[in-house]
Amino acid sequence: MSRKNLLNLIQVDADMPNKAPASDNKLVGQVASSVREEKARQARADDIERRLAEGQAVIELDPSLVESSFVRDRMPGDITGLLASIRDQGQQVPILVRPHPTDAGRYQVAFGHRRLRAVQELGQQIKAIVRNLTDEELVIAQGQENNEREDLSYIEKSRFAHYLKERFPREVIISAMSLDKAEISRMFAIIDQLPADLIDAIGPAPGVGRRSWQELAELVQKSSGEDAIAIVRSESVQQLPSQDRFKAVVAKLKPRRAARLPNVLSAKSGERLAHIRQSKTKLEITIDRTEAADFAAFLLNDAVALFEERRAISQRKKEA
């Protein structure tokens, strides 16, 4: 942009001094005022040119000329609140874009995908900052902006890191995510263990953190990813909010605990028959022969016959 055009865009500050000192005559004062105004204009023009060169100036673009980043971060979600906000108050925060690396006249988003989607639905121009960014600079800007946003869930951040893994070294991912190697590795492990279709079916699951996702990954490894996907895709579960879909599949995959026998075995009348102790490998029945002599005699005399009878019934059912 030329200096001449920049000067045409700039207005003089209202509080800019425009009077000469009292000792100057009127002509000298007018000349001095003009010089100050011109210097102020040039200073502001220099600042605007610097900001334009750095991509800091906010411009309006046709949203049809803007496409998503080449690295996916956010999963599809509800933007009703954002739509209402932009409709009522306008787009308050610009998005960051770069000139498209292969398609002249088009742009690629570094961050601001939800804002772009909302503005597209409203049929408005999109306010944007344009910067010349390399692929690495774009994903670092995208990741660091995501880290500042509370509404980007853990699984979305994990997926974003995993997408970066396919194209960039670990150092770039650490810069983009502002996380240490250990946490990045945990994110990779979770995404590697979970089927992509399962994550898509669950959705972003806001509020569900790392430990919960690790638990799900372990459950899927012990059972079946296909079973988990079938659970989440069921009509009843799909009607739930994303975080509740997550809870539903975890609850279904968790092994059910075997029903424990009571500590005291009693007759319907309330008469105490025996004490029971059980562990994973043992079941111990202790009978006080002074309190339940008949029950003790029954076990000693008839328990084996009852067992044989029950086993014979089970065998006939299998052969039928």
Image (tube, rainbow, N blue to C red):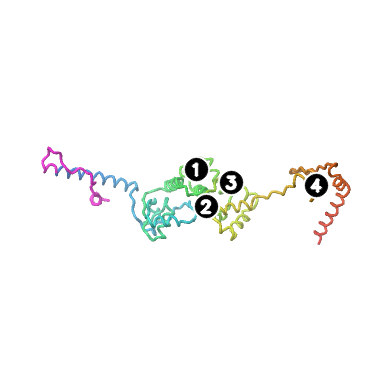
User: Is tag 4's residue or tag 2's residue first in the polypeptide sequence?
Assistant: 2
- Residue holding disc 1: 170
Q: Is residue 291 left or right of residue 78?
A: right
- Residue holding disc 3: 214
Q: Is residue 38 left or right of residue 64?
A: left
Instruction: Where is residue 282? Give x, y as percent.
Output: 77, 43
- Residue holding disc 2: 204
Q: Residues within 10 Å of mark 3 (few under 14, many from 20)?
A: some
Which residue is most to the right?
A: 301
Q: Secondary structure at mark 2?
A: loop
User: Is tag 1's residue or tag 3's residue first in the polypeptide sequence?
Assistant: 1
Q: Which mark is residue 271?
A: 4
Q: Secondary structure at mark 3?
A: helix
Three-letter code, disc 1: Arg
Q: Main secondary structure of the magenta part?
A: loop
Q: Secondary structure at mark 4?
A: loop
Q: Is residue 184 magenta?
A: no
Which residue is most to the bottom?
A: 320
Please name whichever residue, 151 or 84, is drawn nearer the observer in this view of the structure: 84
Compute the Cα span from label 1 to label 3.
21 Å
Does the residue at mark 3 contact the one at mark 4 (Cβ under 8 Å)?
no
Three-letter code, disc 2: Pro
Q: How many marks?
A: 4
Which of discs 3 and 4 lies nearer the camera? The answer is: 4
Compute the Cα span from label 3 to label 4.
48 Å
Q: Residues within 10 Å of mark 2 (few under 14, many from 20)?
A: many
Three-letter code, disc 4: Glu
User: Is tag 3's residue or tag 2's residue first in the polypeptide sequence?
Assistant: 2
Give the position of the C terminus as an image quadrant: bottom right
Compute the Cα span from label 3 to label 2.
15 Å
Compute the Cα span from label 1 to label 4.
69 Å
